[in-house]
Image (spheres, rainbow, N blue to C red):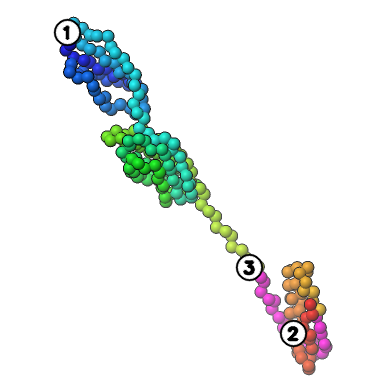
C-alpha cells in the first residue's frame, strides 16, 4: 500500500486531500456549521485502488437555541438564550431596522442573557448572536422585536375651585335705602356646587349695591342655613 486518498463531498466545490499510508485520522477544516457531509475514503495501491468507503456525518451546529426577548420597554430590550456547550464567546448585535442604529457586545461562553439600552421608542430591532468555539464561529441566530411606545404625559387639570366674586360698587338707587335685611340660604348638599355658587354671587352683589351698612343705613343679619 502506498497512500490513502480522502475525498470530502459537500454542497459546493469538491474537497480532496491525499495523506500518507501511516495516517489513519484526519481533521477536515473550514466546513459549514450544522451541515451534513458525505466523506469518501479510497486506498491506493501500486496495482490500483480499493473500493471507496463512504460515511455520512453532520457538523455541530454552532448556534444558540431558545432565543427570546423579555423586559421590552420604550428605551430597552433584553434577550435570553440557551447556552451552547463548550462555547468560548458570544458576539451579540442589536440593530434598528428603521435607521440602522447598532450596538455590539462580546460575552463569555457561559452567558445566557443581555440587555440593550438607549433605544428608540416604537422602533423595530433585530438581535443577532454569533457563537464562537475556539477559532470557529457559527452562523447568526436572530430574533426581531419592537420597543414599546413612549408614555404619554397626563393632561393638566384646571383648578376645581372658582375665585370669589368681585363686590360691585354701590348703585345710586340704593344709596339712601334704610332697611333690615335677613338672608335664608339653603346650604344642604342637594342644591349642588353650581347653585351654591350662584347664591354666593347673589349675596355679594346685593351687599355691594348698598351704600351704608350699619345702624345708620341698612342692617343685615348673617345668612341663615
Q: Earlier in the sequence, mark 1 or mark 3?
A: 1
In the rendered structure, does residue 209 fall within the stretch colored magenta?
no
Main SS category, magenta section: loop
In the rendered structure, does residue 176 fall within the stretch colored magenta?
yes
Mark 2 highlights which residue?
170
Q: Earlier in the sequence, mark 2 or mark 1?
A: 1
**Left or right of 218, for residue 109:** left
Q: Residue visible at 48% across and 50% down?
A: 74
Q: Earlier in the sequence, mark 3 or mark 2?
A: 3
Which quarter shows the N terminus?
top left
Per the rendering, the mark at residue 46 is 1
Give x and y (percent) for residue 57.
34, 21
**Left or right of 209, for residue 50:** left
Give x and y (percent) for residue 183.
80, 80
Residue toward you, 108 or 116: 108
Per the rendering, the mark at residue 159 is 3
Give the class, few, some or many, for how many residues have Cα within 10 Å of label 1's Cα (few <14, many ≥20): few
Q: CA distance from mark 2 to mark 1?
A: 135 Å
Residue toward you, 225 or 44: 44
Q: Residue visible at 74% across and 76% down?
A: 200
Which quarter shows the C terminus?
bottom right
Give x and y (percent) for residue 215.
78, 93
Which region shows up in magenta? 161-183
Give the class, few, some or many, for how many residues have Cα within 10 Å of label 2's Cα (few <14, many ≥20): some
Q: Residue visible at 66% across and 70% down?
A: 161
Give x and y (percent) for residue 98.
45, 43
- Mark in the foreground, 1 or 3: 1
Amino acid at each position: 500500500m502506498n497512500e490513502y486518498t480522502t475525498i470530502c463531498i459537500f454542497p459546493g466545490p469538491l474537497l480532496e486531500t491525499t495523506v500518507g499510508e501511516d495516517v489513519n485520522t484526519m481533521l477536515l477544516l473550514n466546513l459549514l456549521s450544522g451541515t451534513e457531509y458525505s466523506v469518501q475514503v479510497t486506498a491506493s495501491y501500486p496495482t490500483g485502488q480499493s473500493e471507496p468507503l463512504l460515511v455520512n456525518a453532520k457538523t455541530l451546529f454552532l448556534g444558540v437555541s431558545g432565543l427570546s426577548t423579555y423586559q421590552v420597554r420604550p428605551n430597552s430590550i433584553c434577550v435570553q438564550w440557551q447556552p451552547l456547550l463548550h462555547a468560548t464567546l458570544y458576539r451579540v448585535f442589536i440593530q434598528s431596522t428603521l435607521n440602522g442604529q447598532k450596538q455590539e457586545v462580546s460575552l463569555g461562553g457561559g452567558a445566557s442573557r443581555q440587555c440593550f439600552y438607549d433605544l428608540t421608542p416604537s422602533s423595530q430591532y433585530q438581535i443577532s448572536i454569533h457563537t464562537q468555539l475556539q477559532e470557529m464561529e457559527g452562523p447568526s441566530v436572530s430574533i426581531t422585536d419592537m420597543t414599546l411606545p413612549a408614555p404619554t404625559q397626563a393632561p393638566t387639570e384646571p383648578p376645581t375651585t372658582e375665585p370669589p366674586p368681585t363686590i360691585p360698587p354701590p348703585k345710586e338707587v340704593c344709596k339712601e335705602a334704610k332697611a333690615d335685611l335677613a338672608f335664608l340660604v339653603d346650604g344642604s348638599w342637594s342644591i349642588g356646587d353650581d347653585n351654591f355658587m350662584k347664591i354666593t354671587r347673589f349675596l355679594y352683589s346685593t351687599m355691594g349695591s348698598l351704600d351704608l351698612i350699619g345702624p345708620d343705613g341698612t342692617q343685615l343679619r348673617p345668612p341663615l342655613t
